[in-house]
């Protein structure tokens, strides 16, 4: 039986007028507080984040975005299936962004339900131009809850986001304040022996990397629904209620480890799609991933929702409590983790990675080619690398995710497309298959073609890979219940594979969702040709051209329209 709370909520929702799918959003600059200081940021409707958009499966959405800033902008509807021109990616499918002083009205039918989000797809703007989307299902949800809350995790820096990128270009380790010291070396010598400790240092030095460099940017303040830890975002409940938390990693560059000490979390949806419920103590979230969880507090106490950055430089937190403003205890901070040679897919006999171009190595006597790492075996378990999780904790594994209902199409992929995640750390250039976005030919698939994408990470960084316009079926050993996701973490030195049936026509961005990796080149165009295409094809900007015509000349225009990407 539905609780009075749920009955009232349902009655309110169904009483909403038809225009519930109509919103007006304004991108403008405003002063916001970051780390105790007032700084100017681009915002949505004056806030970071912007308003949560509440839609319903089966209705039509009409969202007008007005640009009141001095630079072009855009809004992308992350995870939403829609016509390509409405995706909000400048330089794709005829959409070139929203000029200063102009407005653009996005219209599309809602064909799905679940937890999603929106953000700018222009340059580095999605550092602050973002918000949550909740889409109610047309049919009753398989998951009952007495309360339903959005938990939008974010990171924000007092610096100008373009300056952050310039700093990384000048020195890729600019923000790594946790580099190992001589004291660390002496400690390692005592624990491992002089030979092993020295060999480890030499290997990392040869790669021009540091095992503490789990994240490119530090100095962030971490937020829950725009609130810093001391502001204590509070979610109120009554003892014994079932609470649905829609947790969204809307950060620019931060992977979070999320837990609620004292409460188990039952994961019921991943990236907006229902999964067979699985109970966990915590989970790791890549940028742009979403997990819906159910928690059932049985005590009248305050619980802390704790989202710790994987490099342990800070955390976001909120409180679940029976009264507004109550505070739960802050859990003990975990020590920073270190990458190991095993995390990188190597033994101590290897000292290089095939995908990383390390300038200066040859003239130092290192034969990079002779030490290149072989492509690692397929791996779909991203939680084991540099984790720092406590012994005995149940941590969500991609292998735990099973779609709630079986797939109708379980046919074998017609072909496999390998996507090597590559880069040059010395110049802070991130690439796919060794090529930047403005240099790479697009990936082309036929309408209805079933393909496998094999992401092979040849770098030291984890990359959350995202495809616009359609969902991946994650190959994780779940048979015909492969979970649907739009973003998957590919850990350092590992591989993750997905399959999909290409039924969304258009040119779609496929990219790493770490902001500064994307704008530095780790993106390509994934083009689904129209049905029956034989002699012509679709370009990145949506035009139809003969299949034999090169797209190289047109690619520059798409690149230029993508906010400096």
Image (cartoon, rainbow, N blue to C red):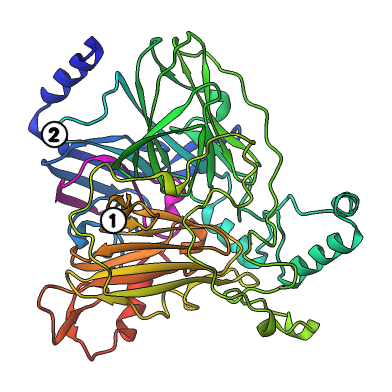
Measured as percent of width and height from the top left, residue 459 is found at: 58, 67
Mark 1 element type: loop
Q: Residues within 10 Å of mark 1 (few under 14, many from 20)?
A: many
Q: Which residue is mark 2?
A: 139
Q: Is the residue under label 2 in contact with that under label 1 (CB below 8 Å)?
A: no
Measured as percent of width and height from the top left, residue 97 is found at: 29, 61
Q: Is residue 294 above or below residue 480?
A: above
Q: Is residue 377 above or below residue 20?
A: below
Q: Residues within 10 Å of mark 2 (few under 14, many from 20)?
A: few
Q: Residue furthest bottom?
A: 548
Quadrant position of the C terminus in the picture? bottom left
The question of residue 454 being in magenta is answered with no
The span shown in magenta is: 100-129
Name the N-terminal-most of marks 1 and 2.
2
The residue lying at 64 percent from left, 36 percent from top is 391
The residue lying at 62 percent from left, 77 percent from top is 357
For the question of whether residue 100 can be seen, the reply is no
Using the rendered view, name the quadrant where residue 562 is placed. bottom left
The question of residue 103 being in magenta is answered with yes
Measured as percent of width and height from the top left, residue 334 is found at: 68, 36
Q: Is residue 395 above or below residue 80?
A: above
Measured as percent of width and height from the top left, residue 564 is found at: 43, 67
For the question of whether residue 319 can be seen, the reply is yes
Given residues 153 and 263, the one toward you in this image is 263
Given residues 70 and 198, the one toward you in this image is 198
Apparent side of residue 520 relative to residue 504 in the rendered image (left or right): right
Mark 2 element type: loop
Q: Which residue is mark 1?
A: 471
What separation in Å lies between label 1 and label 2 (alpha carbons)? 21 Å
């Amino acid at each position: 039986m539905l609780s009075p709370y749920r009955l009232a909520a349902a009655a309110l929702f169904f009483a909403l007028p038809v225009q519930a799918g109509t919103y007006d959003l304004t991108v403008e600059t405003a002063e916001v507080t970051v780390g105790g200081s007032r700084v100017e940021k681009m915002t949505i409707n004056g806030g970071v984040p912007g308003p949560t958009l509440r839609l319903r499966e089966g209705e039509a959405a009409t969202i007008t975005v007005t640009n009141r800033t001095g630079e072009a902008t855009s809004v992308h509807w992350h995870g939403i299936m829609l016509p390509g021109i409405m995706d909000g990616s400048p330089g794709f499918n005829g959409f070139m962004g929203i000029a200063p002083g102009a407005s653009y009205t996005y219209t599309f039918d809602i064909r799905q339900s679940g937890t999603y989000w929106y953000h700018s797809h222009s340059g580095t703007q999605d550092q602050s131009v973002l918000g949550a989307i909740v889409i109610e299902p047309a049919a009753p949800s398989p998951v009952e809850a007495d309360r339903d809350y959005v938990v939008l995790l974010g990171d924000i820096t007092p610096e100008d986001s373009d300056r952050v990128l310039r700093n990384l270009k000048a020195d890729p380790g600019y923000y790594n304040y946790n580099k190992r010291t001589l004291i660390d070396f002496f400690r390692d010598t005592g624990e491992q022996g002089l030979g092993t400790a020295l060999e480890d240092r030499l290997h990392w030095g040869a790669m021009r990397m540091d095992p503490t460099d789990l994240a490119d940017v530090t100095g962030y303040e971490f937020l829950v629904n725009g609130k810093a830890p001391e502001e204590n975002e509070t979610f109120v409940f009554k003892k014994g209620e079932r609470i649905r938390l829609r947790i969204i990693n809307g950060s620019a560059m931060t992977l979070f480890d999320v837990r609620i000490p004292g409460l188990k979390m039952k994961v019921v949806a991943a990236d907006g799609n229902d999964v067979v419920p699985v109970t966990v103590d915590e989970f790791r979230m890549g940028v742009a991933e979403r997990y819906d969880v159910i928690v059932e507090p049985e005590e009248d106490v305050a619980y802390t929702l704790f989202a710790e950055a994987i490099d342990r430089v800070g955390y976001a937190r909120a409180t679940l409590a029976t009264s507004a403003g109550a505070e739960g205890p802050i859990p003990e901070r975990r020590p920073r983790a270190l990458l190991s040679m095993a995390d990188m897919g190597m033994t101590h006999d290897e000292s290089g990675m095939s995908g990383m171009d390390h300038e200066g190595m040859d003239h130092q006597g290192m034969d990079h080619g002779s030490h290149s790492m072989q492509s690692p075996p397929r791996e779909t378990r991203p939680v084991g690398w540099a984790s720092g999780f406590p012994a005995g904790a149940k941590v969500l594994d991609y292998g735990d995710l099973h779609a709630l209902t079986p797939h109708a199409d379980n046919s074998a992929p017609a072909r496999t497309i390998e996507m090597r995640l590559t880069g040059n750390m010395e110049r802070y250039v991130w690439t796919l298959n060794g090529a930047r976005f403005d240099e790479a030919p697009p990936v082309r698939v036929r309408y209805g073609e079933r393909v496998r994408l094999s992401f092979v990470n040849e770098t030291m960084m984890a990359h959350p890979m995202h495809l616009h316009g359609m969902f991946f079926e994650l190959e994780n050993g779940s048979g015909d219940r492969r979970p649907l996701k739009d973003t998957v973490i590919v850990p350092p030195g590992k591989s993750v594979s997905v399959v999909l049936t290409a039924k969304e026509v258009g040119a779609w961005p496929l990219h790493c969702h770490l902001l500064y990796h994307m704008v530095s080149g780790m993106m390509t165009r994934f083009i689904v040709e129209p049905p029956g295409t034989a002699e012509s094809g679709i370009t990145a900007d949506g035009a139809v051209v003969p299949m034999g015509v090169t797209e190289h000349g047109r690619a520059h225009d798409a690149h230029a329209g993508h906010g400096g990407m």
